[in-house]
Image (cartoon, coloured by chain):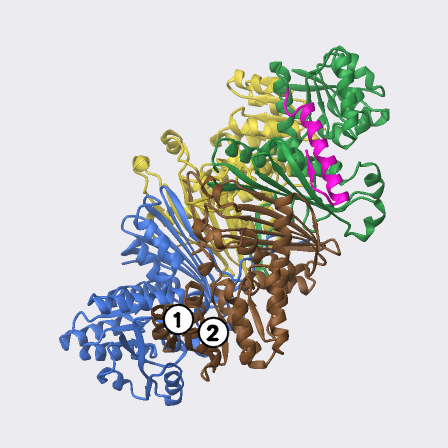
Chain colours: A green, B blue, C yellow, D brown
Amino acid sequence: MLRIGIIGAGRIGRVHARSVAAHPQAKLTLIADPMLDSAQEVAQAYGAEATSEANDVFVSDNVDAIIICSPTPLHGDHIVAAAAAGKPALCEKPLAMDSESVAQIRERLEAQGTPNPLVMLGFNRRFDPSFSSIHEAVEAGEIGQLEQLTIISRDPAAPPKEYIAVSGGIFKDMTIHDFDMVRHFLGDIKTVTAVGQNLDPELADTGDFDGVVVTLQNEAGRSATITNSRHCASGYDQRLEAFGSEGALFAENIRPTTVRRSNKHVTDAQEPYLDFFLERYEAAYARELSAFIDAVTDGRVPSPGIEDGAQALRLAEAAEKAAKEGVVVKL
Amino acid sequence: MLRIGIIGAGRIGRVHARSVAAHPQAKLTLIADPMLDSAQEVAQAYGAEATSEANDVFVSDNVDAIIICSPTPLHGDHIVAAAAAGKPALCEKPLAMDSESVAQIRERLEAQGTPNPLVMLGFNRRFDPSFSSIHEAVEAGEIGQLEQLTIISRDPAAPPKEYIAVSGGIFKDMTIHDFDMVRHFLGDIKTVTAVGQNLDPELADTGDFDGVVVTLQNEAGRSATITNSRHCASGYDQRLEAFGSEGALFAENIRPTTVRRSNKHVTDAQEPYLDFFLERYEAAYARELSAFIDAVTDGRVPSPGIEDGAQALRLAEAAEKAAKEGVVVKL
Amino acid sequence: MLRIGIIGAGRIGRVHARSVAAHPQAKLTLIADPMLDSAQEVAQAYGAEATSEANDVFVSDNVDAIIICSPTPLHGDHIVAAAAAGKPALCEKPLAMDSESVAQIRERLEAQGTPNPLVMLGFNRRFDPSFSSIHEAVEAGEIGQLEQLTIISRDPAAPPKEYIAVSGGIFKDMTIHDFDMVRHFLGDIKTVTAVGQNLDPELADTGDFDGVVVTLQNEAGRSATITNSRHCASGYDQRLEAFGSEGALFAENIRPTTVRRSNKHVTDAQEPYLDFFLERYEAAYARELSAFIDAVTDGRVPSPGIEDGAQALRLAEAAEKAAKEGVVVKL
Amino acid sequence: MLRIGIIGAGRIGRVHARSVAAHPQAKLTLIADPMLDSAQEVAQAYGAEATSEANDVFVSDNVDAIIICSPTPLHGDHIVAAAAAGKPALCEKPLAMDSESVAQIRERLEAQGTPNPLVMLGFNRRFDPSFSSIHEAVEAGEIGQLEQLTIISRDPAAPPKEYIAVSGGIFKDMTIHDFDMVRHFLGDIKTVTAVGQNLDPELADTGDFDGVVVTLQNEAGRSATITNSRHCASGYDQRLEAFGSEGALFAENIRPTTVRRSNKHVTDAQEPYLDFFLERYEAAYARELSAFIDAVTDGRVPSPGIEDGAQALRLAEAAEKAAKEGVVVKL
């Protein structure tokens, strides 16, 4: 039974707390949050202890592995501290706010003698049953050579402007997931083109794009296209198409039920998509946690890791430059 | 170039006239209708001659084969006359109003020395691209042994009461197509159960059912279920499922386009089904005509024939008895 | 926190144990099974106590409500005992092996002064998200008057012959769920027709049908058709179509992912259906338990209840008579 | 009855000949091709006259309107000649091999005093029932403001290398249709980015891309993405998604039938897509011809016209530059 400590009792920390509680090989023992009330609320629900000090998690004899759900600017500190304590960590994405910060994290890890800590990055979509099934089929050669990857990823509605202001921008906040997925399928990327959109008048003064289209290409010429929007009337639009020389694979949206309706206006109409990531990726979060627990239990380096977080961030920065300056960025 | 004469310039006669005109191996030469204006209108459109006398078609030197689109009570007379004239005929369904009349037709054919004339019955659905593709796959053993056939067949809206009054009832008028399809897939039927419905208050005084569910079983125990309704809000609902020991085949409804729409209420909503049989079975009528022309050209007996018309009528009578008397009818 | 005792630690007992453990308002406290090892295994996993005596569950001060997962012949004894103990019970289906046994259960309940105990019958499909969504839409009048209900229900593979021998026959073992669904939508049934099939040579000597088609009709003439098979190559085939005067609603099958594949042979091909009831109806079991817990907590009589179990059994007996004797059964 | 002359009796000329023959308001009277045999073959089939001289079509008293199906380099000459003869013309795409040639055509038209002739460009996809239904819905505001257009367009298999060598390259030969579609939905384009792929070793020495991804953006920031490939295992892959602020519209692929198949490997598998453009866009060609005939009959300037052909070509040239030089092209 792996004893888990969680840093951060916010929305995503609670998702992980519930997944841990439901996991047969893990147990939540400690949860830390500067807002002690919040930590206590989660602790109580799952029979764990609470603290307001993140540091308690690193030093506790009652914690075998750590899930880092703190705000992004603290990810580096917490990864470094977990590595220093010799405890494996699952860290939420993004790894940091920029590539410079990533370099600093690596320097600190190097400096303290833990250059390759057991850190997994929370790119949960790699663990989505549909996306991972497609990834396996592609790796198995089912569609021959993968040639064109097409990702549609749209949120149901824009977050509050206050959130956008500190989000690091759409590429680091939203597209980051898609960049990781592109790397998962295509490996290293050579060129990035991107266009940004400011279509929603409500978001005009945020200075951030509310829609983007990014095209990436690897050395072998295989391409990936990402289409993002901050809003989608029908819910959380999450699709992927892998087109290859021998066939194609599609991951379609998920609805709450399989009901279809027909009347004099429409036929076989389905329901709106599952509304947002907690529902849509519920299975992905659980499978991600299992992969982390399995790796820790087996003493393996979990994947995706720090390098994946660093590379996704690099693509986000390249896309931002491409969109803002109207250039093609070569990596 | 096969020279075709058509008897009857009504709705279905015009469908065939157009199919003949579009067919590379056939040519409409003569059309007969007691309403001469109507015959002339069609004749003019396709460069044919018109007459008010059906008999002219049988005797004309300019007619190689005949399409009989006269009212059902005249089908027998016209089949017998075509046989006497030695001309192949494609006769619209149903063959007659009842099995007794069918017996009389056969006696007359026998008496005039043409017991097996070249007559094809217009069960057009056998020629529908989807249904015939499924039939071929079943015959080829793709789903192992066929075990359960499920047919849904609903008209978009009930015909006028005046039509229902002379239609012979829903089983002979509407289900007759489905009975033929069942025989096409299952062969001879041993038992028939049926329930009738009177759900539409508008049709209450017609004395006819407005919905029926019929279950048929052949000697080997294989079953077929037919669900009919005189109305369907979404259009002409025409589906078939062939379930077998190794798999299943489904024929879905057809829409005018492939457009799907999503908004905050629905996702991937399709359009209403094609509205009625002329649109829905346009390809089936053309393929039926081709099969007739090919058989005539090759001197083969076309299929389905008189026996198929007789057997479908027998099933209609059995189902009517089953539904009205609340019994299981054994054949 | 409702303290739950479970009688029976077999497959379905374990499903409920897990659902109880995951439910925020309930807690498993005691589990009974004549095979004490089995009970202990479940007890340990969820921090409960174990016993080999069902009676301990009825008398325990630590049990507020009971889930009866014993073999069908014991359902009556356990319902009567729970009622005598004043404890609400959720009893698995079917209520009993025959209507006579149901009558005896009712007499015993009457005799001990508990004619209307808080008993819920485990017709889990009523709680399936898709089926219940359709039921709500029908009740809300979305499709006008419901006219024709069509249920397809096929198991992925036949159970062992030993199971079939004691199952009570396909109508009580398998169709019973569909009979309850028909009553859920149509209410009381007036006539039953049914055909049985013996198509699988492997099952020829069980004396039981391996496929059935049942048509039911209520007083108002509304119909329901049930098509069952003991096997289906593509998995657990569970579909429902509610056709009404203004539209139709369809519940489609569920697959493990949303992946579709295209190659030179097929396009948009989906995966086989979820394999069997534990996976397919996982959400239904959880929602059923919630409904039971809510009713108990609120002191309401839970639904579906004993009368529903009795009526479904009555329909099973009617269908068996219809299929075996080749008659229409009027109720 | 509009008397039509066709220049060119090749594949596309024959498509139009058949459409003309089937059209109730038109009649093929003359067909020209340097290979007189070919022209005669078509002429005979439809009761028209044949000639080896294109010029005969322009001067014939028996021709009211002309369909230009000559090789692309001759389009300019034939458009100018038709204009000089005062005869409306439907000219196949592309208008010319490059923008310079377009400028010359315009100069010649200007010089001969026919600056705005009645010329329609054969962008047949605008007339596809699904695409045009989506266009109408977008124009009607059904999805609010159009924000992101996504076009997938893949041929079933690459043409012969000899064809590619004289095709003008993938952007002018294949993407040209998609550029017109983008303009149809988004109007004038401001920026073009594109990546080219050389993935098929068979085509390596053609010097042409075998796959491309193009992203376009108009002044208002609305985007369009085009994904092309010279091959697709499943057939002719033709899809379009229009995403807007209030919803989305999708045009799906077309199959020969509606059959779906299930077995132990797949469920609801559909057939490969219609194989190529003559089948896929059969309805589009017919509707295009009708639009031309209606415009001519009414004396209106048909649409799309020369300017549309010129602009599509301009986008093709911009995309080619973007892909070859790795730059963003601003128009």
What residue do we see at 64% from left, 21% from top? A302
Q: Amino acid at mark 1?
A: Gly
Residue holding disc 2: B159
Q: Chain of mark 1?
A: B
Membership of A317 in magenta stretch: yes
In front of the other: D276 or C1:
D276
C266 vs A304: above or below = below
Residue holding disc 1: B169
* Region of the chain picked out in magenta, as a range: A302-331
Q: Secondary structure at mark 2?
A: loop
A68 vs D55: above or below = above
What residue do we see at 49% from left, 39% from top? C271
Q: Quadrant of residue C84?
A: top right
Q: Amino acid at mark 2?
A: Pro
Membership of B67 in magenta stretch: no
Mark in the foreground, 1 or 2: 2
In front of the other: C123 or B89:
B89
Residue A281, image x, y percentages:
65, 36
